[in-house]
Amino acid sequence: MFCKGIGISFGGEAKDAARRAAIRALAQNPKPGFAFLFSSISYNQPDLFETIRQELGNIPVFGTTSPTIITNLGLACHWVLLVLITTDGLEFSIQAGKCKENPSEVARYLCNRTCMKIPLFPGTSLPAFC
């Protein structure tokens, strides 16, 4: 089973935007296993992450920031996007690497690290978030 919840909010203070995104995502997936958080760099990041952690409880939260987001509503500079994931029977491996001057090298490095942890058999697929 794979269950997701997606919440997005625009504008306001970091705590309010984070809370709105969490409420919207939790309405679709009330018991997430982990979360991906993407947000505008214009928000106070400690306030944003603290609010997300309060709303979600003690689940792993991974994320990044960006100056803008493009949606079907157009370009936005103050935004929070929260993706909640719940899975049964799927295993996740999280790896990190520094990109430096060559992004393709870090991708190769991360795939090799992940493949060493997960035994792959013929016909097995390896989905990834990058």
Image (cartoon, rainbow, N blue to C red):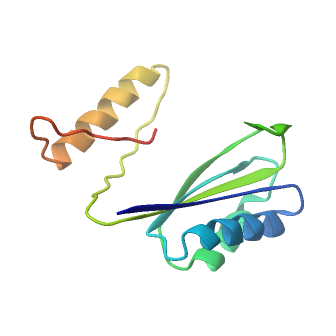
| Vertical placement of residue 108 versus 67, above or below | above
Q: Quadrant of residue 97?
A: top left
Q: Position of residue 47 (x, y in %)?
A: 75, 67
Residue at screen point 31% across, 27% down: 108
Q: Position of residue 125 (x, y in %)?
A: 24, 38
Quick one: which residue is furthest to the left in this view? Answer: 121
Residue at (45, 20) in percent of width and height: 102
Indicate left or right for 50 with 130 as reference.
right
Does any portion of residue 48 appear in the rendered image?
yes
Q: Residue at x 36, y 51 (%)?
A: 94
The N terminus is located in which quarter? bottom left
Residue drawn 49% across and 76% down?
31
- Above or below residue 92? Residue 74 is above
Q: Residue furthest right?
A: 12
Numbered disc total = 0
Q: Is residue 68 visible?
A: no
Question: Where is residue 69 drawn, in percent x and y?
Answer: 74, 39
Front one among 3 and 66: 3
Nearer-the-camera pick, 114 or 127: 127
Task: Tell me the quarter of the picture where residue 33 sits.
Answer: bottom left
Q: Is residue 116 left or right of residue 95?
A: left
